[in-house]
Amino acid sequence: HFELLLESELKNNKNSFYFIQIGANDGVGFDVLYNYVTKYNCKGIVVEPLKFYFDKLKDNYSKFKNILPLNLAVHHSDKNAFIYHVDPNKLKKYSKWAQGIGSLNSKHYCNSKIDNNDIVKEKVNCIHLMDLIKKHNVENISLLQIDVEGYDAEVLKMLNLDIIKPKIIKYEIASLLKEDADLVYKKLINHGYSIFTQEQDNIAY
């Protein structure tokens, strides 16, 4: 169970715990991480490319100076890219999940029965995952959490496990193609991880 694994890691390594969250949205809407990292006053980086959600993310973490919000997307090669998401002015038409379907894939929303007219594209700045890690002098990662709507495997492909090996990796598998899911699964297994599935995510440790 992810929460038990996370709680154990936090209790045993409170002072050295460091996390990176890729696709943080507003920080509070879609996962339990916020409650844990604020409770233990953790150090870490939260990454969100879309300005509308980044502003909320920054506000939600404003009292926690050890946590750095970055307004970026993670990409293997591009310096900027377009993300397709629901127009914030149209969110009231949909359930809360519509906030979280922003994707580099222009067709990702088609599975969600979102009206084509309610989708907008936003140009965002990008950075390679390893460049982000190097730029911010990250030497150890206790938790790498990824939720980027079908691009999770691409983020994991960027991770050089010979340079840095997170203790826990949580990534969404619901939107992955089978070949991508299999590829990153094998990569993690080959580097000594055990993996279990919880709802829409894989947790490697």
Image: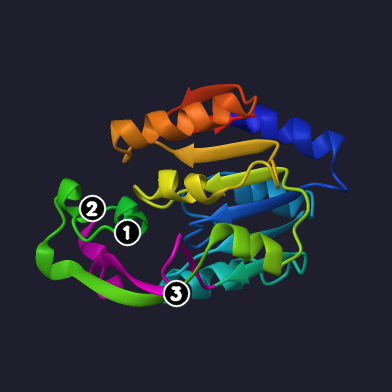
Residue 12 placement (x, y as % from top left): 85, 34
* Magenta-span inclusion, residue 20: no
Q: Quadrant of the N terminus?
A: top right
Circles 1 and 2 in contact, beta carbons < 8 Å: yes
Callout 2 crowding tier (Cα within 10 Å): few <14, some 14–19, many ≥20? some
Local SS, label 3: loop
Identity of the residue drawn at 42% across and 29% down: 199
Identity of the residue drawn at 67% across and 72% down: 62
Nearest-to-viewer mark from 3 and 2: 3
Label 3 to label 1: alpha-carbon separation: 16 Å
The residue wearing badge 3 is 79
Residue positioned most to the front: 162
Identity of the residue drawn at 23% across and 57% down: 94
The residue wearing badge 1 is 103
Highlighted range, magenta: 71-94
Q: Quadrant of the C terminus?
A: top right
Viewer-proximal residue among 17 and 97: 17
* Horizontal relation, residue 124 to residue 113: left or right: right
Q: Amino acid at mark 2?
A: His
Callout 1 crowding tier (Cα within 10 Å): few <14, some 14–19, many ≥20? some
Indicate which disc, 3 or 2, sits on the residue closer to the N terminus: 3
Local SS, label 2: helix
The residue wearing badge 2 is 108
Indicate which disc, 3 or 1, sits on the residue closer to the N terminus: 3
Viewer-proximal residue among 129 and 35: 129
Q: Amino acid at mark 3?
A: Lys
Residue 121 placement (x, y as % from top left): 26, 73
Viewer-proximal residue among 52 and 145: 145
Callout 3 crowding tier (Cα within 10 Å): few <14, some 14–19, many ≥20? some
